[in-house]
Image: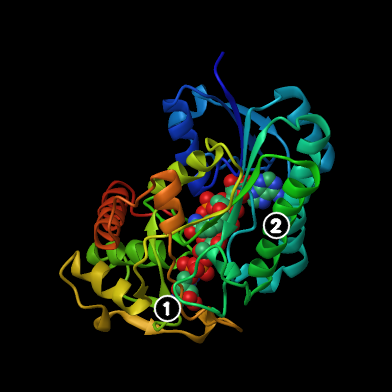
Amino acid sequence: MAKKALVTGITGQDGSYLAEFLLAKGYDVYGMVRRTSTVRYERIRHIQDKLHLVQGDLLDQTSLVRAFSDIQPDEVYNLAAQSFVPTSWNQPVFTGDVTGLGATRMLEALHTVAPQARFYQASSSEMFGKVQETPQRETTPFYPRSPYGVAKVYGHWITVNYRESYNLFAVSGILFNHESERRGLEFVTRKVTYHVAKIKLGLAHELRIGNLEAKRDWGYAPDYVEAMWLMLQQAQPEDYVIATGVTHTVQHLLDVAFQCVSLDWRNYAVQDERFMRPAEVDLLVGDASKASALLGWEPTVTFEQMIEKMVAADLERLKKDPDNVI
Ligand code: NDP
Ligand code: GDR
Protein backbone atom coordinates (compact mmCIF):
# COMPACT_ATOMS: atom_id res chain seq x y z
CA MET A 1 0.00 0.00 0.00
CA ALA A 2 1.31 3.44 -0.93
CA LYS A 3 1.73 5.86 1.96
CA LYS A 4 -0.73 8.75 2.07
CA ALA A 5 0.46 12.30 2.61
CA LEU A 6 -1.76 15.32 3.19
CA VAL A 7 -0.15 18.64 2.25
CA THR A 8 -1.70 21.98 3.16
CA GLY A 9 -0.42 24.92 1.13
CA ILE A 10 0.10 22.67 -1.90
CA THR A 11 -0.45 25.58 -4.31
CA GLY A 12 2.45 27.51 -2.73
CA GLN A 13 6.14 27.35 -3.53
CA ASP A 14 7.07 24.63 -1.04
CA GLY A 15 3.84 22.67 -1.47
CA SER A 16 4.49 22.23 -5.18
CA TYR A 17 8.05 20.97 -4.68
CA LEU A 18 7.05 18.73 -1.78
CA ALA A 19 4.23 17.23 -3.86
CA GLU A 20 6.68 16.42 -6.67
CA PHE A 21 9.11 14.93 -4.15
CA LEU A 22 6.45 12.73 -2.50
CA LEU A 23 5.02 11.56 -5.83
CA ALA A 24 8.53 10.49 -6.88
CA LYS A 25 8.74 8.46 -3.63
CA GLY A 26 5.50 6.68 -4.52
CA TYR A 27 3.16 8.45 -2.08
CA ASP A 28 -0.52 9.11 -2.68
CA VAL A 29 -0.51 12.87 -2.33
CA TYR A 30 -3.57 14.73 -1.08
CA GLY A 31 -3.38 18.50 -1.42
CA MET A 32 -5.63 20.91 0.41
CA VAL A 33 -6.90 23.82 -1.68
CA ARG A 34 -9.14 26.77 -0.87
CA ARG A 35 -12.06 27.66 -3.06
CA THR A 36 -11.37 30.90 -4.92
CA SER A 37 -13.28 32.56 -7.76
CA THR A 38 -10.16 32.45 -9.92
CA VAL A 39 -8.26 29.18 -9.78
CA ARG A 40 -4.48 29.66 -9.33
CA TYR A 41 -2.89 26.24 -9.62
CA GLU A 42 0.08 27.33 -11.76
CA ARG A 43 2.68 25.72 -9.54
CA ILE A 44 1.00 22.30 -9.55
CA ARG A 45 -0.57 22.34 -13.02
CA HIS A 46 2.09 19.92 -14.37
CA ILE A 47 1.28 17.29 -11.71
CA GLN A 48 -2.38 18.04 -11.10
CA ASP A 49 -3.63 14.79 -12.62
CA LYS A 50 -1.44 12.81 -10.18
CA LEU A 51 -2.72 14.60 -7.08
CA HIS A 52 -5.89 14.25 -5.03
CA LEU A 53 -7.09 17.78 -4.36
CA VAL A 54 -9.38 18.24 -1.37
CA GLN A 55 -11.17 21.43 -0.44
CA GLY A 56 -10.40 22.90 2.94
CA ASP A 57 -9.24 25.97 4.78
CA LEU A 58 -7.14 26.44 7.89
CA LEU A 59 -9.83 28.80 9.15
CA ASP A 60 -12.50 26.10 8.95
CA GLN A 61 -12.09 23.36 11.57
CA THR A 62 -14.85 21.22 10.07
CA SER A 63 -13.09 21.02 6.72
CA LEU A 64 -9.89 19.86 8.43
CA VAL A 65 -11.62 17.18 10.50
CA ARG A 66 -13.36 15.93 7.37
CA ALA A 67 -10.09 15.79 5.41
CA PHE A 68 -8.25 13.87 8.16
CA SER A 69 -11.16 11.53 8.65
CA ASP A 70 -11.66 10.78 4.93
CA ILE A 71 -7.97 10.45 4.04
CA GLN A 72 -6.52 8.88 7.22
CA PRO A 73 -3.08 10.14 6.18
CA ASP A 74 0.22 8.61 7.25
CA GLU A 75 2.01 11.97 7.05
CA VAL A 76 0.74 15.54 7.24
CA TYR A 77 2.71 18.58 6.12
CA ASN A 78 1.22 21.85 7.36
CA LEU A 79 2.65 24.37 4.90
CA ALA A 80 -0.40 26.64 4.62
CA ALA A 81 0.06 30.15 5.99
CA GLN A 82 -0.29 33.84 5.32
CA SER A 83 3.45 33.84 4.67
CA PHE A 84 4.32 37.39 3.55
CA VAL A 85 5.82 39.36 6.43
CA PRO A 86 4.71 42.92 5.40
CA THR A 87 1.09 41.76 4.96
CA SER A 88 1.16 40.61 8.56
CA TRP A 89 1.22 44.25 9.74
CA ASN A 90 -1.76 45.09 7.53
CA GLN A 91 -3.69 41.97 8.51
CA PRO A 92 -2.35 40.96 11.93
CA VAL A 93 -5.50 39.23 13.16
CA PHE A 94 -5.97 37.27 9.95
CA THR A 95 -2.28 36.29 10.00
CA GLY A 96 -2.59 35.12 13.61
CA ASP A 97 -5.70 33.15 12.74
CA VAL A 98 -4.28 31.31 9.71
CA THR A 99 -0.57 31.09 10.53
CA GLY A 100 -0.88 30.63 14.29
CA LEU A 101 -4.27 29.19 15.21
CA GLY A 102 -4.38 27.29 11.91
CA ALA A 103 -1.67 25.00 13.30
CA THR A 104 -3.83 24.30 16.36
CA ARG A 105 -6.81 23.48 14.16
CA MET A 106 -4.67 21.03 12.20
CA LEU A 107 -3.24 19.40 15.32
CA GLU A 108 -6.65 19.17 16.93
CA ALA A 109 -8.09 17.48 13.84
CA LEU A 110 -5.15 15.09 13.75
CA HIS A 111 -5.34 14.33 17.47
CA THR A 112 -9.09 13.69 17.23
CA VAL A 113 -9.43 11.58 14.09
CA ALA A 114 -5.97 10.49 12.86
CA PRO A 115 -3.56 10.40 15.85
CA GLN A 116 -1.30 7.88 14.13
CA ALA A 117 -0.34 10.40 11.46
CA ARG A 118 3.07 12.09 11.58
CA PHE A 119 2.86 15.88 11.51
CA TYR A 120 5.22 18.51 10.12
CA GLN A 121 4.79 22.18 11.06
CA ALA A 122 6.39 24.80 8.79
CA SER A 123 8.15 26.95 11.35
CA SER A 124 10.40 29.82 10.38
CA SER A 125 13.66 31.61 11.08
CA GLU A 126 11.46 34.73 11.47
CA MET A 127 10.86 33.40 14.99
CA PHE A 128 14.47 34.39 15.84
CA GLY A 129 13.79 37.98 14.72
CA LYS A 130 16.02 40.23 16.80
CA VAL A 131 18.54 37.47 17.16
CA GLN A 132 19.71 36.50 20.62
CA GLU A 133 22.59 34.38 19.35
CA THR A 134 24.51 33.91 16.09
CA PRO A 135 24.30 31.56 14.31
CA GLN A 136 20.76 30.58 15.26
CA ARG A 137 20.15 26.98 16.28
CA GLU A 138 17.33 24.89 17.78
CA THR A 139 18.05 26.19 21.30
CA THR A 140 18.28 29.91 20.42
CA PRO A 141 15.53 31.90 22.20
CA PHE A 142 12.87 33.43 19.95
CA TYR A 143 12.32 37.18 19.59
CA PRO A 144 9.91 37.66 16.66
CA ARG A 145 9.69 41.09 15.01
CA SER A 146 6.42 40.92 13.06
CA PRO A 147 2.89 39.63 13.59
CA TYR A 148 3.90 36.85 11.18
CA GLY A 149 6.88 35.91 13.35
CA VAL A 150 4.73 35.99 16.47
CA ALA A 151 2.14 33.73 14.82
CA LYS A 152 4.87 31.27 13.83
CA VAL A 153 6.18 31.17 17.41
CA TYR A 154 2.67 30.19 18.48
CA GLY A 155 2.55 27.53 15.74
CA HIS A 156 5.90 26.18 16.89
CA TRP A 157 4.99 25.92 20.57
CA ILE A 158 1.56 24.44 19.95
CA THR A 159 3.26 21.72 17.89
CA VAL A 160 5.66 21.00 20.75
CA ASN A 161 2.77 21.11 23.19
CA TYR A 162 0.61 18.63 21.27
CA ARG A 163 3.61 16.32 20.93
CA GLU A 164 4.17 16.41 24.68
CA SER A 165 0.51 16.43 25.73
CA TYR A 166 -0.74 13.63 23.49
CA ASN A 167 2.43 11.79 22.52
CA LEU A 168 1.97 12.67 18.85
CA PHE A 169 4.70 12.39 16.24
CA ALA A 170 4.69 16.15 15.60
CA VAL A 171 7.79 18.07 14.53
CA SER A 172 8.62 21.67 13.83
CA GLY A 173 11.05 22.44 11.04
CA ILE A 174 12.67 25.84 11.61
CA LEU A 175 13.47 26.68 8.02
CA PHE A 176 15.49 29.70 6.98
CA ASN A 177 14.56 31.59 3.80
CA HIS A 178 14.40 29.38 0.75
CA GLU A 179 13.73 30.55 -2.75
CA SER A 180 13.30 29.22 -6.26
CA GLU A 181 11.96 29.90 -9.74
CA ARG A 182 8.51 29.37 -8.15
CA ARG A 183 8.92 31.95 -5.38
CA GLY A 184 6.08 34.48 -5.11
CA LEU A 185 6.83 37.78 -6.86
CA GLU A 186 6.58 39.86 -3.68
CA PHE A 187 9.52 38.18 -1.89
CA VAL A 188 12.79 40.02 -2.37
CA THR A 189 14.81 37.41 -4.30
CA ARG A 190 12.12 36.83 -6.90
CA LYS A 191 11.20 40.50 -7.03
CA VAL A 192 14.83 41.21 -7.93
CA THR A 193 15.30 38.40 -10.47
CA TYR A 194 11.99 39.24 -12.16
CA HIS A 195 12.92 42.91 -12.44
CA VAL A 196 16.43 42.09 -13.64
CA ALA A 197 14.88 40.05 -16.46
CA LYS A 198 12.35 42.81 -17.25
CA ILE A 199 15.07 45.48 -17.33
CA LYS A 200 17.33 43.32 -19.51
CA LEU A 201 14.49 42.81 -22.00
CA GLY A 202 13.62 46.53 -22.02
CA LEU A 203 10.25 45.90 -20.32
CA ALA A 204 11.09 47.95 -17.19
CA HIS A 205 13.56 50.66 -16.30
CA GLU A 206 13.84 50.55 -12.53
CA LEU A 207 13.50 48.38 -9.46
CA ARG A 208 11.99 49.95 -6.36
CA ILE A 209 13.34 48.28 -3.26
CA GLY A 210 13.54 48.60 0.54
CA ASN A 211 16.30 47.87 3.06
CA LEU A 212 19.55 46.87 1.34
CA GLU A 213 21.39 46.11 4.59
CA ALA A 214 19.23 43.20 5.81
CA LYS A 215 21.06 39.86 5.82
CA ARG A 216 19.43 36.54 5.09
CA ASP A 217 20.49 32.90 4.91
CA TRP A 218 18.96 31.99 1.55
CA GLY A 219 18.75 28.36 0.38
CA TYR A 220 17.10 26.54 -2.53
CA ALA A 221 13.52 25.37 -1.89
CA PRO A 222 13.79 21.87 -3.48
CA ASP A 223 16.61 21.07 -1.00
CA TYR A 224 14.42 22.21 1.88
CA VAL A 225 11.37 20.05 1.13
CA GLU A 226 13.59 16.99 1.35
CA ALA A 227 14.48 18.03 4.91
CA MET A 228 10.76 18.18 5.80
CA TRP A 229 10.31 14.60 4.65
CA LEU A 230 13.47 13.40 6.41
CA MET A 231 12.18 14.80 9.71
CA LEU A 232 9.11 12.57 9.49
CA GLN A 233 11.18 9.43 8.74
CA GLN A 234 13.11 9.49 12.03
CA ALA A 235 12.57 7.22 15.02
CA GLN A 236 11.89 10.20 17.33
CA PRO A 237 9.96 13.42 16.68
CA GLU A 238 12.38 16.33 17.07
CA ASP A 239 12.70 19.90 15.85
CA TYR A 240 15.43 20.94 13.42
CA VAL A 241 16.94 24.11 11.99
CA ILE A 242 17.39 23.97 8.21
CA ALA A 243 19.75 26.56 6.73
CA THR A 244 22.84 26.96 4.56
CA GLY A 245 24.97 28.65 7.23
CA VAL A 246 25.87 31.44 4.79
CA THR A 247 24.34 34.92 4.94
CA HIS A 248 24.18 37.70 2.34
CA THR A 249 22.87 41.27 2.29
CA VAL A 250 20.06 42.34 0.00
CA GLN A 251 22.67 44.53 -1.69
CA HIS A 252 24.75 41.45 -2.49
CA LEU A 253 21.62 39.86 -3.93
CA LEU A 254 21.37 42.88 -6.27
CA ASP A 255 25.04 42.52 -7.23
CA VAL A 256 24.70 38.85 -8.08
CA ALA A 257 21.36 39.14 -9.92
CA PHE A 258 22.29 42.13 -12.07
CA GLN A 259 25.68 40.57 -12.84
CA CYS A 260 23.83 37.62 -14.39
CA VAL A 261 22.79 39.95 -17.22
CA SER A 262 25.94 42.13 -17.16
CA LEU A 263 24.21 45.19 -15.70
CA ASP A 264 25.05 47.36 -12.67
CA TRP A 265 22.19 47.55 -10.14
CA ARG A 266 23.21 51.10 -9.15
CA ASN A 267 21.80 52.34 -12.46
CA TYR A 268 18.34 50.82 -11.82
CA ALA A 269 17.60 50.32 -8.12
CA VAL A 270 15.64 53.06 -6.36
CA GLN A 271 15.24 52.87 -2.62
CA ASP A 272 11.60 53.30 -1.69
CA GLU A 273 10.25 53.91 1.84
CA ARG A 274 7.16 51.85 1.02
CA PHE A 275 9.24 48.69 1.20
CA MET A 276 10.77 49.42 4.62
CA ARG A 277 9.32 47.51 7.58
CA PRO A 278 8.14 48.93 10.93
CA ALA A 279 10.47 46.46 12.66
CA GLU A 280 13.21 44.70 10.71
CA VAL A 281 14.99 41.40 11.14
CA ASP A 282 18.56 42.57 10.50
CA LEU A 283 20.51 39.34 10.39
CA LEU A 284 19.70 35.68 10.01
CA VAL A 285 22.20 32.88 9.67
CA GLY A 286 21.39 29.33 10.71
CA ASP A 287 23.36 26.46 12.16
CA ALA A 288 21.97 23.26 10.63
CA SER A 289 24.54 20.94 12.20
CA LYS A 290 21.83 18.92 14.00
CA ALA A 291 20.09 18.25 10.67
CA SER A 292 23.41 17.36 9.10
CA ALA A 293 24.29 14.91 11.89
CA LEU A 294 20.89 13.26 12.43
CA LEU A 295 19.14 13.60 9.05
CA GLY A 296 22.22 13.55 6.82
CA TRP A 297 20.81 16.71 5.23
CA GLU A 298 23.01 19.18 3.34
CA PRO A 299 22.13 22.01 0.94
CA THR A 300 23.18 21.27 -2.65
CA VAL A 301 22.71 24.62 -4.44
CA THR A 302 24.70 27.76 -3.64
CA PHE A 303 23.16 31.21 -3.41
CA GLU A 304 24.85 32.30 -6.63
CA GLN A 305 23.69 29.19 -8.52
CA MET A 306 20.15 29.71 -7.28
CA ILE A 307 19.98 33.36 -8.32
CA GLU A 308 21.37 32.42 -11.73
CA LYS A 309 18.63 29.81 -12.16
CA MET A 310 15.96 32.30 -11.09
CA VAL A 311 17.15 35.02 -13.48
CA ALA A 312 17.34 32.49 -16.33
CA ALA A 313 13.81 31.26 -15.62
CA ASP A 314 12.43 34.81 -15.49
CA LEU A 315 14.15 35.72 -18.77
CA GLU A 316 12.66 32.65 -20.42
CA ARG A 317 9.16 33.29 -19.08
CA LEU A 318 9.19 36.97 -20.03
CA LYS A 319 10.52 36.27 -23.53
CA LYS A 320 7.57 33.94 -24.11
CA ASP A 321 5.08 36.28 -22.45
CA PRO A 322 6.15 39.87 -21.62
CA ASP A 323 3.05 40.28 -19.43
CA ASN A 324 3.95 37.28 -17.27
CA VAL A 325 3.21 37.95 -13.62
CA ILE A 326 3.61 34.48 -12.12
P1 NDP B 1 3.49 30.41 -0.03
O1 NDP B 1 3.00 31.74 0.40
O2 NDP B 1 4.09 30.25 -1.40
O3 NDP B 1 2.26 29.37 0.07
C1 NDP B 1 1.34 29.44 1.11
C2 NDP B 1 0.27 28.38 0.88
O4 NDP B 1 -0.67 28.45 1.96
C3 NDP B 1 -0.55 28.57 -0.41
O5 NDP B 1 -0.77 27.31 -0.98
C4 NDP B 1 -1.84 29.17 0.11
O6 NDP B 1 -2.96 28.89 -0.72
C5 NDP B 1 -1.99 28.41 1.42
N1 NDP B 1 -2.92 29.05 2.34
C6 NDP B 1 -2.90 30.33 2.79
N2 NDP B 1 -3.92 30.54 3.64
C7 NDP B 1 -4.61 29.37 3.71
C8 NDP B 1 -5.76 28.97 4.43
N3 NDP B 1 -6.45 29.80 5.22
N4 NDP B 1 -6.20 27.70 4.28
C9 NDP B 1 -5.55 26.84 3.47
N5 NDP B 1 -4.44 27.18 2.76
C10 NDP B 1 -3.99 28.42 2.88
O7 NDP B 1 4.51 29.91 1.08
P2 NDP B 1 5.83 28.98 0.94
O8 NDP B 1 5.53 27.84 0.07
O9 NDP B 1 7.00 29.85 0.67
O10 NDP B 1 6.02 28.49 2.45
C11 NDP B 1 5.37 27.34 2.94
C12 NDP B 1 5.29 27.39 4.45
O11 NDP B 1 6.58 27.49 5.02
C13 NDP B 1 4.52 28.61 4.99
O12 NDP B 1 3.89 28.19 6.19
C14 NDP B 1 5.61 29.61 5.32
O13 NDP B 1 5.18 30.51 6.32
C15 NDP B 1 6.69 28.67 5.82
N6 NDP B 1 8.05 29.11 5.66
C16 NDP B 1 8.50 29.49 4.42
C17 NDP B 1 9.83 29.84 4.24
C18 NDP B 1 10.34 30.27 2.92
O14 NDP B 1 11.43 30.86 2.89
N7 NDP B 1 9.64 30.01 1.81
C19 NDP B 1 10.78 29.77 5.37
C20 NDP B 1 10.18 29.32 6.62
C21 NDP B 1 8.88 28.99 6.73
P3 NDP B 1 -3.42 29.89 -1.90
O15 NDP B 1 -2.60 29.50 -3.10
O16 NDP B 1 -4.87 29.58 -2.02
O17 NDP B 1 -3.13 31.29 -1.42
P1 GDR C 1 11.28 37.46 4.72
O1 GDR C 1 11.42 37.51 3.12
O2 GDR C 1 10.61 38.63 5.26
O3 GDR C 1 12.66 37.15 5.24
O4 GDR C 1 10.31 36.22 4.92
P2 GDR C 1 11.40 38.72 2.08
O5 GDR C 1 12.00 38.18 0.84
O6 GDR C 1 10.07 39.35 1.98
O7 GDR C 1 12.39 39.80 2.76
C1 GDR C 1 13.77 39.52 2.99
C2 GDR C 1 14.50 40.79 3.38
O8 GDR C 1 14.58 41.65 2.24
C3 GDR C 1 14.30 42.98 2.65
N1 GDR C 1 13.81 43.76 1.51
C4 GDR C 1 12.67 43.53 0.82
N2 GDR C 1 11.73 42.56 0.94
C5 GDR C 1 10.70 42.57 0.07
N3 GDR C 1 9.78 41.61 0.16
N4 GDR C 1 10.56 43.53 -0.89
C6 GDR C 1 11.48 44.53 -1.04
O9 GDR C 1 11.34 45.38 -1.91
C7 GDR C 1 12.59 44.52 -0.15
N5 GDR C 1 13.68 45.34 -0.02
C8 GDR C 1 14.40 44.87 0.99
C9 GDR C 1 13.26 42.81 3.74
O10 GDR C 1 13.17 44.01 4.52
C10 GDR C 1 13.83 41.62 4.49
O11 GDR C 1 14.80 42.03 5.40
C11 GDR C 1 10.40 35.03 4.14
C12 GDR C 1 8.99 34.45 3.99
O12 GDR C 1 9.05 33.37 3.07
C13 GDR C 1 8.48 33.95 5.32
O13 GDR C 1 7.24 33.27 5.12
C14 GDR C 1 9.52 32.98 5.91
O14 GDR C 1 9.10 32.51 7.16
C15 GDR C 1 10.86 33.68 6.05
O15 GDR C 1 11.27 34.11 4.75
C16 GDR C 1 11.95 32.77 6.59
Element at label 1: strand
- SS at badge 2: helix
Residue sitting farthest toward the left: 262
In this view, 127 is above or below 183? below
Callout 2 amino acid: Gly
Q: Quadrant of residue 259?
A: bottom left
Q: Is mark 1 within 8 Å of ligand 2?
A: yes
Q: What residue is shown at x 37% (from left), y 83% (from top)?
A: 270
| CB atoms of marks 1 and 2 within 8 Å | no
Q: Residue at horizontal 28%, vertical 61%?
A: 197
Q: Label 2: how many residues lie within 10 Å, few (<14), some (14-19) or many (20+)?
A: many
Residue name at image x 74 percent, y 30 percent:
68
Q: Is residue 287 above or below residue 109?
A: below
Tag 1 residue: 209
Q: Nearer the viewer, residue 26 or 117?
A: 117
The amino acid type found where label 1 is placed reads: Ile
How has the structure been colored for display? rainbow
Q: Position of residue 46 (x, y in %)?
A: 43, 31
Mark yes or no: residue 42 visible.
no
Q: Examine the image and state in which quarter residue 37 appears.
A: top right
Q: Is mark 2 within 8 Å of ligand 1?
A: no
Question: For the residues carrying marks 1 and 2, which lies nearer the camera in this image?
Answer: 2
Q: State the image coordinates of residue 206 (x, y, percent, origin top left).
A: 34, 76
Residue beneath disc 2: 155
Q: In the image, 161: left or right of 253?
A: right
Q: Tell me where residue 120 appears, x and y as whole percent.
A: 61, 44
Query: Against 189, is 183 above or below?
Result: above
